[in-house]
Image (tube, rainbow, N blue to C red):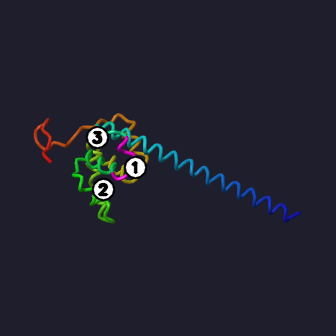
Amino acid sequence: MQDQQIDQAANHGGVLFLLLIILGYIAILAIVILWCVSVWKVFKKAGKPGWASLIPCHNTVVFLEIAGKPGWWFFLIIIPFVGIIFAILALVDFVERFGKGGGYIIGMIFLPFIFMPMLALGDAQYLGPKTDGPPGQPTLP
């Protein structure tokens, strides 16, 4: 009798574990879908095709274009350890192109799955390239 109760408890534990695994996968899938939609909308705000956000490597090149960085930075970003620094530098310019400041940059670094949807679904507008000179004159590459 006691062995049967132990077996039933073990079966319930296994079912609960399986349920938690399934819920975890659903949560991860929801976050991935939210991320894809957010990046798609941010690319569209910047005047780039939304589908470009779904293509690996190409989305990084488009991200760099929006940030105003040259395409060869892609190769710097894929270098281990060094790439993190260049990715953060590009992210700073990317966020500034949408009129956001330091706090938003910190948020994008540490909580991108929250701040990217805020950028995409909020009222942020793409401002275009930074200007160093008089208003209305973009900087030269």
Amino acid type of the residue that numbered disc 3 sits on in the rendered structure: Phe
In the picture of the structure, the residue carrying the numbered disc 2 is: 87
Q: Which residue is mark 3?
A: 98
Q: Element under label 2? A: helix
- The stretch drawn in magenta includes residue 120: no
Q: Report the Cα–Cα distance between label 1 and label 3.
A: 15 Å
- Quadrant placement of the N terminus: bottom right
* Above or below, comparing residue 137 to residue 22 in the picture: above
Which x, y percent locates residue 102?
A: 29, 48
Other residues around mark 3 within 10 Å, as few (<14) / some (14–19) / many (≥20): many
User: Please, what is the three-letter code of the amino acid marked with disc 2?
Assistant: Ala
Picture residue at 29% right of the left edge, 50% below the top: 61
Count of numbered labels shown in the rendering: 3
- At label 2, counting other C-alpha atoms closer than 10 Å, the crowd grade (few under 14, some 14-19, many 20 or more) is some
Asked if residue 54 lies in the magenta stretch, the reply is: yes
Q: Foreground mark, 2 or 3?
A: 2
Mark in the foreground, 1 or 2 = 2
Q: Are marks 1 and 2 in contact (CB under 8 Å)?
A: no
Q: At x 23% / y 51%, what residue is drawn?
A: 69
Residues in magenta, as a range: 51-57
Seen at 34% across and 46% down, the residue is 104
- Three-letter amino acid code of the residue under disc 1: Pro
Determine which of the numbered discs, if any, sits on residue 112 in the image.
1
Q: Which SS class for mark 3?
A: loop
Q: CA distance from mark 1 to mark 2?
A: 13 Å
The image position of residue 63, as x and y in percent, is 30, 48
Check the image and name the residue furthest to the left.
134
